[in-house]
Image (spheres, rainbow, N blue to C red):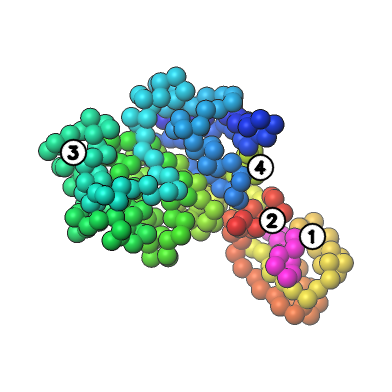
């Protein structure tokens, strides 16, 4: 459905994206995960044609975005970080007028707008003005607008930033519906729980590069393992001496350390760490936050 081949973007002497290669399949949710400044938004801009690559190309179906942008964008829906809704129009009018960009007019535009409002559960707000909507309702409307042309691919660029937990859950359900319908979804996010919940596959980005790729489960098991320990009150020398025989890893984490428990002898290492009398110790399942910490040395914020 979508292929990105050897994408680079350089501004003067600063390279913000380099050598990205990936595909997006129908019915797949692909996540770009990385800290602010990792190159996610620039990458998405290149995918839908808002940013011209310095090198490489993007192909959607049979169309290259750089040479056949109009045809390629007819297959896309785009949700940017900004709502950019027209405050002078009602909810229904925002969709009806936007439909004209795709030559959907009159009764057909109003009918399509009504379908989409029902799809995102905004039918009761059809005649509300934009300033009467909450942040979560605005995000739903922006998603509905991106679907006006019945796209095969939807780009979601940090779509739930700033939303409360309930609004995020509502948006997640809508993304799951898109996947179920066979739409390919490319999602950028810095929320680990969002990535783990929604994405079939992830590309981890740092400083414009892809540093790892795989399903959330695969990335966690391959990079970190099954379980980790959060521990405080031990010196690094003590921690190093305890973990070295197991050839496992640890990193600074908050005011203490994060320790990966090995797949074998995990209980023995846990007991040794506990017996060292730390001021605080806890054991939990590994997650994507731990993956990012292992690969980059920093937490994703």
Sooner in the amino-acid sequence: mark 2 or mark 3: 3
- According to the picture, the residue beneath numbered tag 3 turns out to be 109
Disc with the residue nearer the chain's start (4 vs 1): 4
Q: Which residue is mark 1?
A: 246
- Mark 1–mark 3 Cα distance, whole angstroms, equals 64 Å
- How much space separates mark 2 and mark 3, taking CA atoms? 48 Å
Dot 4: within a 10 Å radius of its alpha carbon, few (fewer than 14), some, or many (20 or more) residues?
some
Is residue 249 toward the left or the right of residue 86 in the image? right
Mark nearer the N terminus (1 vs 3): 3
Query: For the residues marked 4 and 2, what is the alpha-carbon distance in whole angstroms?
Result: 13 Å
- Viewer-closest of 146 and 219: 146
For the residues labelled 4 and 3, the Cα–Cα distance comes to 42 Å
The residue at the point 73 percent across, 70 percent down is: 255
Where is mark 4, residue-wise?
207
Span of residues in magenta: 250-263
Residue 242 image offset from top left, x and y in percent: 83, 67
Q: Is residue 250 above or below residue 275?
A: above
């Amino acid at each position: 459905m979508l292929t990105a081949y050897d994408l680079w973007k350089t501004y003067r002497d600063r390279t913000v994206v380099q050598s990205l290669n990936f595909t997006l399949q129908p019915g797949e949710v692909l996540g770009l995960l990385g800290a602010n400044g990792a190159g996610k938004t620039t990458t998405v801009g290149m995918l839908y044609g808002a940013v011209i690559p310095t090198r490489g190309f993007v192909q959607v179906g049979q169309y290259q975005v750089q040479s056949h942008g109009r045809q390629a964008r007819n297959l896309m829906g785009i949700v940017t970080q900004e709502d950019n809704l027209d405050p002078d129009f009602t909810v229904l009018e925002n969709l009806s007028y936007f439909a004209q960009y795709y030559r959907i007019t009159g009764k057909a535009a109003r009918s399509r707008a009504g379908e989409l409002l029902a799809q995102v559960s905004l039918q009761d707000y059809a005649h509300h003005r934009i300033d009467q909507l909450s942040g979560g309702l605005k995000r739903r409307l922006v998603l509905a607008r991106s679907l006006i042309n019945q796209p095969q691919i939807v780009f979601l660029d940090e779509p739930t930033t700033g939303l409360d937990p309930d609004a995020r859950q509502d948006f997640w359900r809508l993304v799951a519906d898109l996947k179920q319908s066979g739409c390919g979804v490319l999602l950028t996010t810095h929320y680990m729980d969002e990535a783990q919940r929604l994405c079939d596959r992830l590309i981890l980005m740092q400083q414009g590069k892809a540093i790892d790729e795989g399903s959330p489960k695969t990335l966690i098991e391959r990079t970190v393992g099954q379980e980790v320990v959060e521990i405080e009150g031990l010196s690094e020398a003590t921690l190093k001496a305890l973990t070295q025989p197991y050839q496992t890893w640890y990193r600074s984490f908050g005011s203490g350390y994060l320790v990966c428990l090995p797949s074998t002898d995990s209980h023995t290492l846990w007991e040794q760490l506990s017996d060292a009398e730390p001021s605080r110790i806890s054991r939990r399942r590994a997650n994507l936050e731990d993956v990012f910490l292992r690969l980059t040395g920093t937490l994703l914020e």
